[in-house]
Image (cartoon, rainbow, N blue to C red):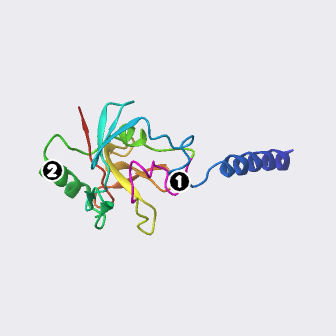
Amino acid sequence: MKSVKTFSILALWLASGAALAACDETDSDRRPSSRFVLNGGEAYDQQTGLTWSRCTAGSAWSSDAGCTGDAKLMRLDEAKQFAQEMGGGWGLPTIAELHSIVEPQCVNPAINSTVFPAVTDFGEGAPYWSETHFEEMPQLIYFIDFLDGAVDAHSEGFALAVRLVRSE
């Protein structure tokens, strides 16, 4: 009986994983862009009322080429300083805000690559900081890996990518 349950669970897991695939810009049913209003390097999310930087910190928006330059990994204190220096109400997102732009049915990346181009695999995924502390272990801060949409936590001394957000 145990082997039947194990097999059933494995089969369900494989079946659900088979539904995950890389989504490209033409896959509008799985990665709809219509919820976002794009304005150069900013994307306004009509569902959440948040405005996102389309480029990862370290790169910059170009109307001809999208995000140009190299994304920069930052410790949490550097990320907060970067947001402050940007001014204009920019800041680090909460884990709920960051999770709102995950496309759970897609992988590599698990984010709308039309709205948010140039998600970089840094060798161990594409982890992006939130400002939300893990309640059970407050020295850890949540992040999301935008290659697969996984949520995890890390200490603030590690360097991760940054996507800024502001509320209107």
Indicate the quadrant where residue 78 lies.
bottom left
**Residue 36 is at least partly visible in this image:** yes
Location of residue 111 in the rendering, given as x and y in whole percent from the top left corner: 46, 49
For mark 1, give the secondary structure.
Answer: loop
**102 falls in the magenta region:** no
Q: Is residue 80 left or right of residue 56?
A: left
Q: Nearer the viewer, residue 45 or 90?
A: 45
The amino acid sitting under disc 1 is Asp
In magenta, the rendered stretch is 106-118
Tell me the tag on residue 114: none
**116 falls in the magenta region:** yes
Q: Main secondary structure of the magenta part?
A: loop
Look at 70% across and 48% down and name the residue there. 13
For mark 2, give the secondary structure.
Answer: helix
Q: Quadrant of the C terminus?
A: top left
Marks 2/1: CA–CA distance: 31 Å
Badge 1 density bin: few <14, some 14–19, many ≥20, Cα 10 Å: some
Residue to which mark 2 is pinned = 86
